[in-house]
Image: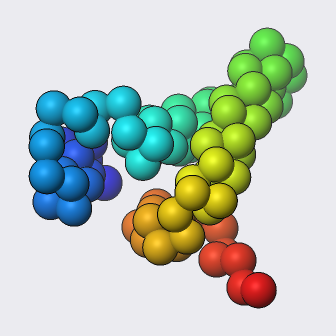
Amino acid sequence: MVKNAFISVISQNEKEKNKNKGSVELQVFSFTNKIRRITSHLELHRKDYLSQRGLRKIIGKRQRLLSYLSKKNEVRYKQLISQLDIREPKTR
C-alpha cells in the first residue's frame, strides 16, 4: 500500500488534512512498513542482532499505539488492522 494513498483514505474520514500527519493510524502504517522491511532484511542476515533489537523496539511501539487506539476508538482500530492485515481483530 502506498503511503499517499493511505493518507488519502485516512483524510477522507477526518475533516482537516493538516492535523492527521501525526495520527495514530499513520504512525502505525509507518511502523508496519519498517517492520516488514527489517523482517525481509533479517531473512537474509539472521545474525544481525542490532536489527533484531531495533525490530523488537518498533514492534513494541506499534503494539502500544494499537493498544491506545483500541481503548480510544474500537471502530478505527478494527478498520486499521483490517486495512494493514496485521492481526486478527479482538472479539469480546
Q: Residue at x 14, y 40 (%)?
A: 17
Toward the viewer: 5 or 92?
92
Q: Quadrant of the C terminus?
A: bottom right
Residue at 22% across / 62% down in the picture? 13
Vertical relation: 29 (above or below) 70: above
Compared across the picture, whether 19 is left or right of 66 comes to left
Query: Where's residue 14, x and y in %?
Result: 21, 54
Q: Is residue 18 left or right of residue 31?
A: left
**Is any atom of residue 79 visible in this view?**
yes
The quarter of the picture where residue 70 lies is: bottom right
In the picture provided, is 22 more to the left or to the right than 74? left
Residue 62 appears at what percent x and percent y? 63, 41
The residue most toward the bottom is 92
Residue 87 on image: x %, y %: 65, 67
Question: Farthest top residue?
Answer: 50
15 or 39: which is nearer to us?
15
Residue at x-position 47% and y-position 73%: 75
